[in-house]
Image: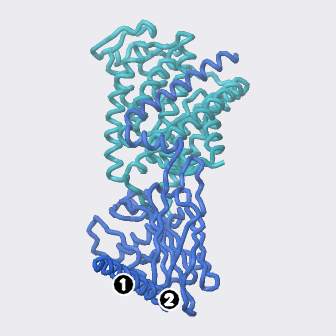
Amino acid sequence: MYIYLPIAEVSVNIFIIFGMGGLVGFLSGMFGVGGGFLMTPLLIFYGIPPMIAVATEANQIVASSISGTIAHWRRSAVDIKMGSILLCGGIIGSFIGIKLFVFLKNIGQIDTFISVSYVILLGSIGSLTLIEGLRSLLIKKYNLKISKKKKVDRNWIYLLPFRLRFRKSGLYISIIPPVLIGMVVGVLATIMGVGGGFIMVPAMIYILRMPTNVVIGTSLYQIVFVTSLVTILHSYQNQTVDIILAIILMIGGVIGVQIGAHYGHKLKGEQLRALLGVIILLVCFKMAYDLALKPDDLFSTINIK
Amino acid sequence: MIKFDMVRYYYKSLLILGLFFLMITDVHSDGLISDISDKNISIETQFTGKDLLLYGSIETEEKIQSDIIITVIGPEYPLIVRKKDKKYAMWINDASYEYSNVPSYYSVYSNRPLENILDKLQMKKNKIGINNLSFTSRSELDNEDVKLDLFEAIVRHKKIDKLFSEDANGVTIKNNKLYKSNIHLPSGVKEGRLKVTIFLIRDGNIVNKDYLNIYLNKRGVGKIVYDVANKKPFIYGIIAVLFALLLGWSMAVIVKYIR
């Protein structure tokens, strides 16, 4: 069944879009990742214009992250104070991101920029995930014991000014690192249509040294607000948010997440992680291939409203 | 009395004169009566294109076979054409050219190949045939090859989307009297007025023209979404966010309830 998307101005097969939402949702539920970094490329591969894929995906992430935030909120696993500091950075980053986005759009380079960003991002996350998965597989198989690095309690973070007490996380640190992390995530969210959890979560654990039990909830809390702002900014500046497309993706995604979470418990973590790494790398190669391959048609035409 | 007579005489002569003119036109001109199966088309969310029946009669005493050409032209829009070049091992957009008046839709139907019906000059003058269209460039274009490449690129892309088409067997004429044609509107057709011109041609000369309009209107959910997104983009963004929040929140509630 075909449906005409009013903003993307293309007819799409509703079941394919629904299926893509479900598939990415399934992977999200299984691996506990956001899924924006897989959804946006899939939409682009299907033929949705990149600018619309990015803005609409930001809208979808609002829905998926609010569900997650509520779940973590119930378990009282959200550090609101830290989340709000991250959010301040996120707001600044989003505004920087939209300025960059509009500038690149006007000079006709936004599509390439989105693709290149994805190749870099997916390439690095994919390889890291794959290596990590393979490493733990090997450790398990040969019963290797690897001595973990000693945790350094005091690092450079503690030398920075503007320190604040975060009771929930049990930290007393400068607000500069969280603001900077939030900013990077805000820029990425605006330009790539991702939540940015895959960068924020490791940064919170390894740089800010937050306890792992509040990391996911706090990151989701920030993502809800940043992706909401990104949706509004894209809508206001570029009119590229397709609500119809977003709704189909949201519904597919929600169902996929539930199924994925159910099966995720039954499968082995290390194999899963290696598999996820392979999937991410495949998407990355496809994106890079499309950039490097000489197009059949060197010309492209764009209607101006 | 005299006055009344004069008036009557005056009307009488006017009537005769009128009839005379009617006779002249009847003899020298060929009538063309046309109609179309649907003049108001709504583009809704499920719109996947539409076929319209255009039909009519040719009123003529001539024995020579008539030709019919039909052109359908949609509203004109500005357009940007970009050319990719290899830079930093990637194919990225390089040169960009702007056009101010490219029709969003153009199709031409005829009963036999256009070049057998009319000469180039008349086709160009009446915008008959895709290659006889001309687009105004806002960019400075000195190089004829580049100009041609760009023209061909626009036409190629429009043809892929079925927005430009030519059909030399698109009109059937019966007994030199009745004609009909199937006008195809693809899914990507834009809102606005489509101008339909029917040319009656004999011996390589246009002997009559008839005009019709088709109005395309977006309707339904898609229309509302499009309008709000473009006219109130800020409010649209807020609605999109509220919708997502509501959907995500209700999902969280449902999931909790199920468990």
Q: Are marks 2 and 1 on the same chain?
A: yes
Residue at the disc numbered 2: B202
Dot 1 corresponds to which residue?
Answer: B13
- Frontmost residue, A50 versus B213: B213
Residue A299 is situated, as x and y percent measured from the top left of the image, at 43, 64
Give the chain of mark 1: B
- Vertically, is B209 above or below B183? below
Regarding residue A275, the answer to whether it shows in the image is no
**SS category of the residue bearing label 1:** helix
Of residues A137 and B59, the one drawn nearer to the viewer in this rendering:
B59
Quadrant for residue A23, please give it. Answer: top right
Which residue corresponds to the image point at 48% horizontal and 72% vertical from the top-left?
Answer: B71
Instruction: Please state which of residues B149 and B38 is positioned toward the viewer in this rendering.
Output: B38
Badge 2: few (under 14), some or many (20 or more) residues near its Cα, within 10 Å?
some
Residue B176 coordinates in the image, percent (x, y): 60, 85
From the image, state the color of chain A.
cyan
B153 above or below A120? below
Residue B125 drawn above or below residue A111: below
Task: Classify residue A273 by image quadrant.
Answer: top right
